[in-house]
Image (cartoon, rainbow, N blue to C red):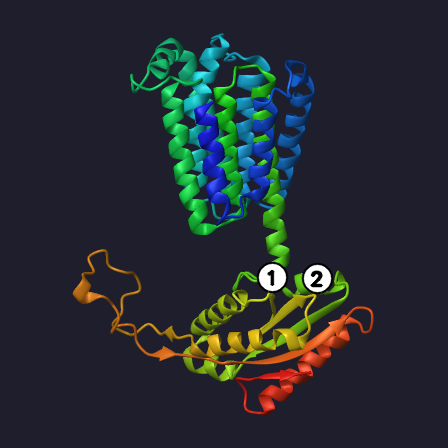
Amino acid sequence: MAYRLAVVMFLAQTLTRTPLLPGLLVVAAAFAAVHFTWLSDSALGPLTIVARTLFIIGGAIALRFGRMRAAMTLGLLALAFEVLVVGGRMPASGAPGESARLFVGWALPLWLLAIGVLPMRAGGALRAALRTALVGACAGASLKLFDVFGADLVMWASRPIFEALPNPGGGQLSAVLFGLALLVLGVRLVRLRSAMDAGLLAVAAAAWLGVMSPPGSAATGLYFAAGAAALGLAIVETGYGLAYRDALTGLASRRALNEELASLRGRYALAMVDVDHFKSFNDKHGHDVGDQVLRLVASVLSATKGGAQAFRYGGEEFTLLWRGKTAEQVREVVDATRAAIADARLTLRGPSRPKKKSKKVTKARRPTKQGGTQVSVSASFGLASGDTRRAPSAAVVERADKALYKAKKAGRNRVMMG
């Protein structure tokens, strides 16, 4: 029980800084159903149907959208499910269910680690087929290895690594390998904060809980089904990000803004934002530096107080939206954001500054003076109030645009009301 609680606590701590919520909720619900004995073994039949359906549908969607990590993970989960849940036996060796649990307990986390950390960039149908064949070959080789050396592997995997510690279901080796998988995938998730990495972490947690449960039980089936569902949600979340997130800045896109405006009820405030002299800046410093500036401005806008939602409208234009507020109420907040953009500095890479940081940089050689010229930008803001009971959102956007134009005509780097 301590191992299960440790998994749940780890996921809960990671949630505060990562997009882990959907997968965490699924795994937590499965844990609660097992922990509070809401689940009986009579549910294994329906769970088998649900799990197989999730494997098939999730795998088809993953392949359709080129999500090879998700497709391979679902394939391995399906294989482990058939070995550990449906039969409770290794297919070739006829080893009992405990042997199957030991095998899955050390093989599955290694497979998940390989899928999670190895590069799998898109490269056409041939490379995708080769990657799939490679993972399938590794899985088949693992099964053959167990078939030939089954008895010795069971004895070795079941042997406690630390005599002073308890030996959980699946053995201490399984606990170590799953712990390593959770650590590596968790670090990757915190670094990249992607929905797919969140799904892989949830799968690792669900699979570990499943391995610790008795082979062939409804609890094991539920955990594997929860892992498939968590990964399916990650695929959906990734698709949503592609459709409603701006790839460069990470802000919500114009499509998301249009849907947000359509869902408004009552009053609201809206600000149109434009980076001043951005075309000249781009021509002088290059598009790469221009992209860095857009990301810098986006980061400042996303930190705007008062409950603001930040969107990239297009090009160097952005939008801020406040529900239930008026332009007068957010005027000071907008001016503070304008000042923060003007105060921000971006250091251009100097010609003598290495592109990659040296691991041997000492305190006396910090690249503070090698960073080149510091540049800054400013932004103009057009602010307007709206009320869905009086005027359509398009009219409010137009008023904010006109106010933005006035701010630029008045000298830029200022806020004008519309």
Q: Dot 2: what SS? A: helix
Compared to residue 41, the image places residue 232 above or below, namely below
| Comparing labels 1 and 2, the label whose residue is closer to the camera | 2
Q: Position of residue 17 (x, y in %)?
A: 48, 50
**Residue position marked by numbered label 2 in the rendering:** 260
Front position in the image: 85 or 377: 377
Check the picture and name the quadrant holding the C terminus: bottom right
Q: Is residue 299 visible?
A: yes
Q: Amino acid at mark 1?
A: Ala
Q: Is residue 354 above or below residue 272?
A: above
Whether residue 53 is situated above or below residue 328 in the rendered picture: above
Circle 1 is placed at which residue position? Answer: 252
Q: Can residue 316 be seen in the rendering of this structure?
A: no
Mark positioned earlier in the residue sequence (1 or 2):
1
Q: Picture coordinates of residue 72 (x, y %)?
A: 53, 35
Residue at image coords 51%, 84%: 277
Where is residue 297 shown, x and y percent of the image?
50, 71
Q: Is residue 402 left or right of residue 377?
A: right
